[in-house]
Structure formats: structure tokens, C-alpha cells
Amino acid sequence: MEKTGRVDEDLYLEFNAAYGYNSATPMSWLLARLKSLAHRLAIGQSLSLYDPTSGAQQTVESMEQFNRWMDRHFPGTWS
């Protein structure tokens, strides 16, 4: 993920499990990965994020798009 900016279905499910566990350690793990993705955007690289609604990857090229994805799938984790 750090090298490619890709969150595929399997990684998304890991993110979702960490989010659903609602405990400090899994949330810290999730936040570290989300910060890594945000950093890629900050340096001008795009992301490929899994969308469980469509079952497809979506290209994300801005923090606005990333924040919308976060709000939809992991609300309350990103300030």
C-alpha cells in the first residue's frame, strides 16, 4: 500500500475490521495507514481505493476525494 497507494478489497476488509473493533490499537494501526495514504496525495501521487458499494477500485487524486471516501466508510476517524 505504501508503494502503490492501492487499497484493494482484502486491505479494505482489514481496515473495516480495525474500524469495527473500536479499540485503541486497531484504530492506531488504521490511522497510520490512512496517514500514509494522505501523504501520497500530499506529494502529488494518486490512490486507488476499493469501493465496497460498487466492488470496484476508484482513483482518488485529491484530499477532498479522500475525505469523502473516509467519511463514507470510516466516519469519525479523520479530523
Image (cartoon, helix red, strand yellow):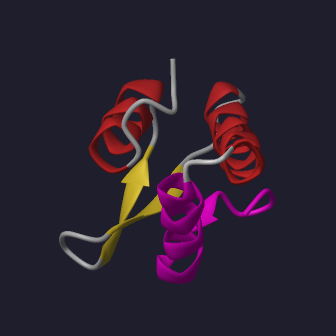
Q: Foreground residue, 62 or 69?
A: 69
Please, which residue is most extreme toward the left here? 54
Q: Foreground residue, 69 or 41?
A: 69
Residue at horizontal 65 percent and vertical 47 percent from the top: 23
Q: Position of residue 34 (x, y in %)?
A: 64, 43
Residue at horizontal 56 percent and vertical 62 percent from the top: 15
For residue 45, what is the image quadrant? top right
- Quarter of the image with the N terminus in it: bottom right
For residue 74, what is the image quadrant? top left
Q: Foreground residue, 48 or 69?
A: 69
In the image, taking residue 47 as reference, residue 38 lies left or right, namely: right
Please, which residue is most extreme toward the top here? 79
In the image, taking residue 27 as reference, residue 29 lies left or right, namely: right
Q: Position of residue 28 (x, y in %)?
A: 75, 42
The stretch drawn in magenta includes residue 6: yes
Q: What secondary structure is the magenta-colored segment mainly?
A: helix
In the image, taking residue 78 as reference, residue 52 lies left or right, namely: left
Q: Position of residue 61 (x, y in %)?
A: 46, 39
Residue at horizontal 59 percent and vertical 71 percent from the top: 14
Residue at horizontal 45 percent and vertical 60 percent from the top: 49
Q: Is residue 49 above or below residue 42?
A: below
Which region of the structure is painted magenta?
1-21
Q: Is residue 8 above or below residue 47?
A: below
For the image shown, how many numbered marks are present on the structure? Answer: 0
Q: Is residue 66 above or below residue 49?
A: above
Q: Is residue 67 above or below residue 17?
A: above
